[in-house]
Image: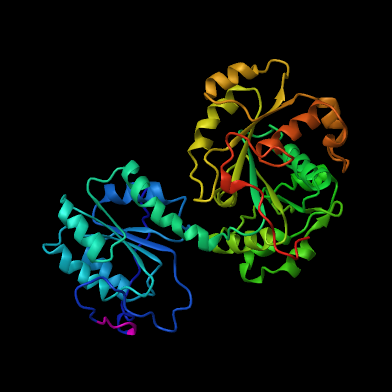
Amino acid sequence: MPNDDPVPDPSGQAEAWQPEPYGNSLHPRPAPAAMLQRDKFIGFACDADSVRVLHTVLAEHIPNDNQVHLADFRHALTILAAMPTPEIVLVDLSGEEQPINALMDLADVVDAGTVVLAIGEVHNVNFYRIVVKNMGVKEYLPKRLTEDLVAEHFLPVVDQLAPRQMSTRGGRMVALCGARGGVGASCVAANLAAYIANELHRHTMLLDGEINTGTLALDLNIPTSRGLSSVLEAPQRVDQLLIERCVQDLGDRLHVMAGMEALTWEAPCNPEGLVAFVQAIRARYNFMIVDVGARLTPLARQFMFNAQQRVIVLDPTLISIRNMEKLYGLQGGSGQASRPLLVLNKAGAPGGLTQSFIEDKLGVALDAVIPDLPRIVGRHSGFGTLAMRQRGPFRQGILALTQALGVGGNFNHPQLLPQFQPQPVHADAR
């Protein structure tokens, strides 16, 4: 749905940044020295249908506080002239008799480094070539907009922000979510992190993204901390010292950050602050394993968006199969693998669906299968021990998952893209 928040009121601010003419090409004016912080995106469209399509497609790719507004081109100019220009600006040229001249007017009010996207009513190849090749517009789409067109032509531009937000250097971030509650995603996440750390000797951070429940802390029998909560409340505090103080050590190479806030406490979800936190973790660890749970909170969605690999844990039930379509539809960042890895947990449980039936319904092979072993798993849950330490089918399932991730000696998994091979961390990695 389109954002109903009012557009910024420029009254009393317009004189702060006076337009400076730049001839006949879309070269932005120099940014004032005071503009130390810029939003990532702001968009404008003249009609509600376009606003709805843009908001639907871009919602998972832009920070939550960035918006698509219902405003015509001239109103958009007034707003942009009274604010530090975001990194990406989307404008609607509909209704402008001279859209080329309108873009020249836009050049007077955008700041240095701004990427401009445009939509409009002109269906003309020559017009497209002029605005893209000569006017500095990054991409132009004629109306009527569709979700497929916006995803194909605008998303690659928006996602170019991701390399600046998430450095390619450092360890890999893997986000595990449950297809529904109770499938055992937390158990799989804890045992996966322990296997990578203890058996493969990779420095690993295990993080509980379900910050209100404290599931990982309970399973591993460790104290909770407010580390992640503190980071979310004050992202400017993120540094290696804060991380050191907030983790629990479970061996030389496995460290855990798990909290348990009140159920009424809502995690602030500042995308830029979360990215800074993830960067700090990835700079120090080979792997960051995040248990995001099954509720898909805003915080969980941010973790899943920024991960290099998503893993979906399901159990042999129709509810899990039904929810898979929704989980598959969640957008991922530009640095993410082509599809999530699928783990069937509790395979063979009484009354459960068969593996062949599940694969037939999903139309894709499962990447790892962990059998239903209530005695073995129950013996370890809550006692600070891990089922993967005991040789047998559970450990083999965790091993299959590490191989699907490209860890543990098998780097040729068919679903693993080349850029997701394990990457070296900084020299000071733990």
Please indicate whether residue 332 sits to the left or right of residue 314 in the image: left
Q: Residue furthest left?
A: 97
Q: Residue at x 37, y 46 (%)?
A: 151
- Looking at the rendering, the stretch of residues picked out in magenta corresponds to 16-20
Residue 374, relative to residue 65: is it above or below? above
Q: Is residue 313 visible?
A: yes
Q: Residue at x 24, y 52 (%)?
A: 47
Q: Is residue 171 above or below residue 181?
A: below
Residue 136, how many percent across, how many down?
Answer: 28, 66
Instruction: Left or right? Give the position of 209 relative to 376.
Output: left
Where is residue 72 drawn, in percent x and y? 23, 61
Indicate the quadrant where residue 402 lies. top right
Quarter of the image where one finds residue 371: top right
Q: Of 410 and 6, which appears nearest the observer?
A: 410
Vertical order, 408 against 166 (above or below): above
Q: At x 43% / y 51%, what residue is drawn?
A: 59
Q: In the shown orientation, is residue 199 left or right of residue 292?
A: right
Whole-percent x, y for residue 131 in the image = 22, 61
Q: Name the quadrant of the C terminus.
A: bottom right
In the rendered image, which quarter is residue 187 located in? top right
Q: Quick check: can you spot residue 72?
A: no
Towards the viewer: 210 or 312: 312
Of 301 and 154, the residue lying toward us: 154
| Residue 315 in picture, x, y percent from top left | 66, 27
Q: Does 403 sit above or below residue 357? A: below
Residue 301 among those drawn in magenta: no
**Left-right relation of 312 to 429:** left
Q: Main secondary structure of the magenta part?
A: loop
- The residue depicted at 60 percent of the width and 44 percent of the height is 309
